């Protein structure tokens, strides 16, 4: 969630237009948006704010873009509704990190869930943007991002941010703000899924 928030700032120029297209601007964006959601949560609860933020009161409505990028990294309340409507056995959640860093295991998990054959594993475990024969399947604009840094998740994320004009790595003070904000939501998500990796804890 913290990396997703960071990428949104650099990829969507209207945020830079308001806060400044610098690491300081990203930090201001993180502080203001997480603080606004936290205020809403204290009044209405996390679930209502995640679903109805700008509809709840005038203060929320006045927040720049209604905390949209903060909310997009809060997965637990949305997944909880899915799990209340469908049996857990009918839902499989995969992380982008697993798809890029552990493609064989991710493919095995997905094919097992779907009850599908693993015959296409060689295609799925090729680097993103390539088919089994190594031929590109992405546009020319996407290919440099997907193939840089061996297409690891960390490398892909850094290449994406840098291609958008951003600076990597994220400043430690900004990471502290974002990680602290998302931590309780990540713990809830991990509990829902029964997998600790969804806490996104750092070494």
Image (cartoon, rainbow, N blue to C red):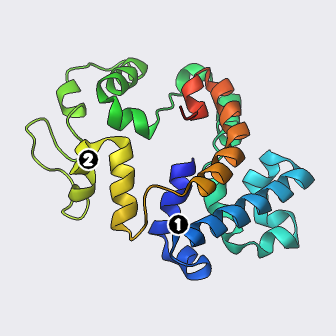
Q: Is mark 1 on a helix, strand or loop?
A: helix
Looking at the image, tell me whether mark 2 or mark 1 is earlier in sequence order: 1
Q: Is residue 14 left or right of 105 when viewed as pictured?
A: right
- Residue labelled with disc 2: 149
The answer, for residue 120, to whether it is visible in the render is no
Which residue is found at the position 33% from the left and 50% from the top? 156
Residue 54 got which mark? none
Residue 9 got which mark? 1
Q: In this view, does 7 lie above or below 46?
A: below
Marks 1 and 2: in contact by CB < 8 Å?
no
Which residue is found at the position 31% from the left and 30% from the top? 103
Say which quarter of the image contains residue 184.
top right
Which residue is found at the position 59% from the left and 51% from the top? 175
Which residue is found at the position 67% from the left and 53% from the top? 177
Q: Is mark 2 on a helix, strand or loop?
A: helix
- Residue 37 in the image: state x and y as whole percent: 77, 58
Q: In this view, does 36 lie above or below 110?
A: below
């Amino acid at each position: 969630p913290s990396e997703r928030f960071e990428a949104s700032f650099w990829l969507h120029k209207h945020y830079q237009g308001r806060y400044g297209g610098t690491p300081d601007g990203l930090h201001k964006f993180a502080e203001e948006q997480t603080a606004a959601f936290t205020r809403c949560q204290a009044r209405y609860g996390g679930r209502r704010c995640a679903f109805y933020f700008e509809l709840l009161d005038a203060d929320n409505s006045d927040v720049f873009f209604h905390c949209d990028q903060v909310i997009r990294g809060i997965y637990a309340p949305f997944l909880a509704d899915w799990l209340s409507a469908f049996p857990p056995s009918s839902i499989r959640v995969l992380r982008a990190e697993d798809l890029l860093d552990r493609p064989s295991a991710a493919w095995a998990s997905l094919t097992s869930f779907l009850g599908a054959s693993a015959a296409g594993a060689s295609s799925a475990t090729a680097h993103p943007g390539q088919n089994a024969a190594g031929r590109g399947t992405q546009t020319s604009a996407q290919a440099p991002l997907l193939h840089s840094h061996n297409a690891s998740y960390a490398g892909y994320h850094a290449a994406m941010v840098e291609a958008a004009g951003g600076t990597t790595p994220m400043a430690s003070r900004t990471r502290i703000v974002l990680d602290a904000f998302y931590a309780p939501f990540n713990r809830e998500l991990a509990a829902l899924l029964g997998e600790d990796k969804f806490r996104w804890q750092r070494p």
